[in-house]
Image: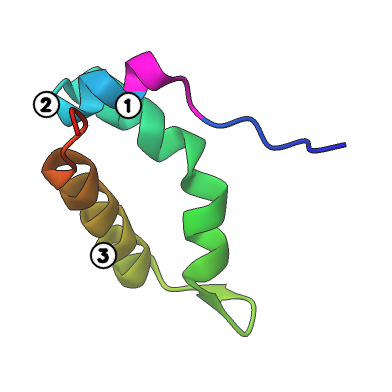
């Protein structure tokens, strides 16, 4: 059984439109993944984690949701 639950479409739409609260909800949803990929040898590189968050926000805002 798949335990992963994606964020709801309404939240993604709002984040894409620039809603700050929706973007924060998306970042919170993906925080565990971000921390996992920003960890090297058991140490979290918070600079890299912030870069991943910035790239996620940029991708959400840039995505053409109406296609």
- Residue 4 percent coordinates (x, y): 69, 37
**Quarter of the image where one finds residue 36:** bottom right
Quadrant of the rendered image containing residue 20: top left
Label 1 with label 2: CB-CB less than 8 Å = no
Q: Is residue 41 left or right of residue 8?
A: right
Q: Quadrant of the C terminus?
A: top left
Label 2 sits on residue:
18
Dot 1 or dot 3: first in sequence order is 1
**Towards the viewer: 50 or 3:** 3
Image quadrant containing the N terminus: top right
Q: Which residue is mark 3?
A: 51
Give the residue at x 23% y 42%. Answer: 60
Point out the residue furthest to the front here: 67
| Residue 24, horizontal then vertical, whole percent | 31, 30
Say few, some or many: other residues with alpha carbon within 10 Å of mark 2 (under 14 / 14 to 19 / 20 or more): some
Along the line of sight, the residue nearer the viewer: 58 or 28: 58
The magenta stretch spans which residues?
7-11
Vertical position of residue 40 compared to residue 15: above or below: below
Looking at the image, residue 9 sits to the left or right of residue 6; the answer is left
How far apart, in angstroms, are the residues tagged by discs 1 and 2? 10 Å
Q: Is residue 9 magenta?
A: yes
Q: CA distance from mark 1 to mark 3?
A: 20 Å
């Amino acid at each position: 059984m798949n335990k992963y639950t994606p964020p709801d479409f309404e939240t993604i739409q709002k984040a894409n439109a620039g809603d700050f609260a929706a973007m924060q909800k998306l970042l919170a949803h993906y925080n565990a993944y971000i921390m996992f990929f920003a960890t090297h040898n058991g140490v979290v590189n918070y600079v890299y984690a912030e870069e991943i968050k910035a790239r996620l926000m940029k991708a959400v805002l840039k995505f053409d949701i109406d296609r």
